[in-house]
Amino acid sequence: MAKPIPPQSTAPDPVCRLRVEYAKRGRLRYLGHLEVLRTVERSIRRAGLPFAVTQGFSPHMRVQFTSALPVGVSSLHEYFDVLLTREVDASEALEALRTSMPEDLGPARAEVLPVRVPALEAWLNALSWHVEVRALDGSTLDASEAERSLQALVARGTLEYLRGTKPKTVDLTQAIIGCDVDGGEGGAVCLDLVCACGEHGQLRPDALVRAVVECMGAPACSIDVCRTEQGHRGEDGQIVKPFSR
Amino acid sequence: MRAAREDLFYLIEPLLPQVEKPSRYLDHEWGSTRPSGDFHVCLMYPDTYEVGLPNMGLAILYRELNRCEGLSCERAYLPWVDMATLMRERGVPLLALESAAPVASFDVVGFTLAHEMACTNIIEALDLAGIAVRACERDEDDAIVLGGGPSVWNCEPVAPIFDAVLLGDGEEALPQMCLAIRDARRRGATRAQILGELAQIQGVYVPSLYDVVVDETSTRWGYAVPKPGSGAPERVLKRVVADFAGTDPLPSAPVPYLNVVHDRLAIEVLRGCARGCRFCQAGITYRPVRERPAEQVIAACERGLGATGYEEVSLTSLSTTDHSQCAQILTTLNDQLEDEGVRVSIPSQRLDSFGVEMAQAVSSGKKGGLTFAPEAGSQRLRDVINKNVTEQDLERAVRNAFELGWRRCKLYFMMGLPTETDDDIRAITRLAERVMEIGREVVPKGQRGGLSVSISVAVFVPKSHTPFQWAGQLSLDEVRRRQRLLLVSCGDRAVRISYHDAETSLLEAVLSRTGRATFELIYRAWELGAKMDAWTDQFDFATWQQAAADCGFDLEAIASEPLPLDARLPWEHTSPGVSRGFLEREWRRAHEGVTTADCTMTSCTGCGICQATGADIVLAGER
């Protein structure tokens, strides 16, 4: 069967990629993942960067992102890679993005990298989270109680939870690389988690912490989640950051 | 009492994790302005953020008002049902986006009258804001509530809500109105004095200055006459921006985070349409036709794409392919945007080969569906409605489209047009079958699986200020009978048939052709829970039937009643400038099956709008 042939694009091939670190904070933490992607793409267009486009019927920008942040979750370190059709000066590109991105998604660093490097989302397999749990009735939560509950959950091995109506299962022994539990201000409990993501699935920290709260028998709580770092964990267990500098 | 102007975002923020699409309520989009100045205007679209944000009219007015020294304009939309429920539970008032200040703290609150079905949402918005719904119940220092937009042409059913309504183009008139209100407030003028001053501005209708009189010269809905001594004009004539190309072609809508209904840059390439379809209200109310020159459109696209970062630009108007430089604009834009992954789109296809060529020009190889609107199935009825399209035009356009690679074709029709018979209904399916035949003829055998022809049939709604304003609507039973006839008359099972909801159309007719007394029906429906009536999953006809019973309205009788040709109509005091003689002549010619040409392509057809408004047709080239 004859199929329509896509138009031959005259668009040039990419010569490098620009890696950018940005944040997701303030009220913009309520953006959904797709909303962030669209906003970043439009910011790149506004910045006038020489982005590369895909071939085919509906050409689109060649840009890669890190894994989805849930609605309501903030982040100190998000990353995107955009493929460029000519070399740019990283600091000039960063300056252009500073004036084209919304303040609460503000870019902090930029670096020019070769076209061929591993895709960000798959490569960043060690994610750090800071979670603050606060009882809605104002009562003080016990940090050591929270730690015991967490260890009990890990000892059980797997965490089963509902994401919307979909049942999910995560192997906690694989998913949790590190964890610190501390008392926070005003009776809050803070958990600093380092989670691995890979074939065994990605652990949503809010799901874990909700299970911890349930296990503690604590009253209704607000759970504030922030992604604090993303890195690549090699075979040797060392964590490498996405920026060389 | 006017609410205090203060940032109340902290009241909304805790609700965000509990609602759908929290980005509806965030503000901080690219291009959202920081309020300044000491006179605050809030423009409100009476539906959700994703429906309201792309509205072209509001984007133009947002720009114009914020450019005005001393004026500051913000936006508000109606929260979705989940958020509205939470806000009522917690006593949180409706807030404007930019300042997060209560809408009730603003000096002016302006509503877009987007369509008839938004009427309950306007009441809902005022109620959520804590502003009295009826203009007569507002206090001295309460916000002045204005209305304007596409659906003002019989605003009597919602007139009791508004302190003033603007008819026609708003880019010059609305800043003028807001400055007049500001100056009057500074002088310490009373509310009544302010309204009296507004009534002196051309295009401004102040409902409270008019009495509704019912007598033997009128329909049962009466007609409006200025109150003695009010100084209000007997007939309010719409505003027209005569030098349309002299206005900035770039609207300033913030770039949304949320995936809104038209998520792209929109450039209005021309205003008005003179094709003269006799059912079409916009075709009268936006006249005269005024085009922007090609260079201006192209420069605006470049500037707008750079400023917003959109990946699509739409060239909007009532009939973009009628622009005298349409081909030139599309070719130039395609060349310029080729390597940037930017799509160009036009909103609708003209029903001839040129229309298909233009669709081809923007398709960049990818062929989705192609939509045509023959509106009526038979040539006889197309002549009645003045849809100047022949069977040959249609066949050629469709053949052309299939040859160029399109496989899906959608045809829009109306049911219940004046003089329609069962033969006209059967002609709809015959036409669709003919299109399918052409498709099978043109499309190679291996590709016919993708071939699809669908027809969508809406119910005719008689609209004010059109040649069909005197016509009644089909009764619900008759609509259902003709829908069945349509189904059984279709011999080709590959043709898909869909209908618009007849009950919504019935209500549209009631809201389009009645008078001020209908406000009580709308208010009652809202009290009974009607809102978001344009959302099919929210619309509940039973609620409206209950409201009609409570108010003594017979909805079907009202919608289907023909109006006497010699009666004074309830909307004649709010005028788009069309002469009554023209409408009567067109009504007669319709019944004789005589068509009337497009005045931008031949000579003046005598609608009277240029003469009444002092504006002229402005074309950028030869049509």
Image: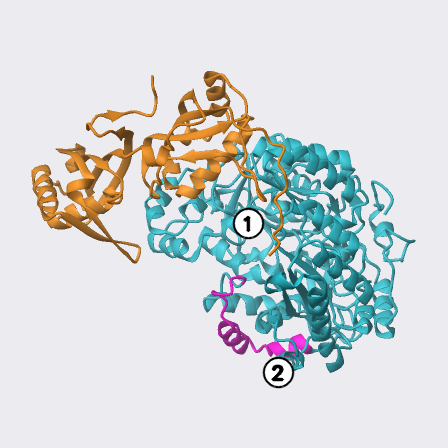
List the residue tagged with mark 2.
B477
Q: Is B309 placed above or below B225 here?
A: above
Q: Is B474 placed above or below B309 here?
A: below
Q: Is B294 placed above or below B289 here?
A: above
Based on the displayed image, in which of its 4 quarters is residue B418 positioned? bottom right
Q: Residue furthest right?
A: B603
Q: Tell me residue B32's x, y (percent).
A: 52, 35
Residue at 74% in and 72% down = B377
Q: Magenta part of the protein: which range?
A: B534-560
Q: CA distance from mark 1 to mark 2?
A: 35 Å
Q: Residues within 10 Å of mark 2 (few under 14, many from 20)?
A: few
What's the residue type where badge 2 is placed?
Answer: Asp
Residue at 53% in and 78% down = B549
Q: Tell me residue B565's x, y (percent).
A: 81, 73
Give the cyan chain's letter: B
Based on the displayed image, in which of its 4 quarters is residue B512 positioned? bottom right
Secondary structure under the numbered disc 2 in the rendered image:
helix
Residue at 75% in and 45% down = B270
List the residue tagged with mark 1.
B52
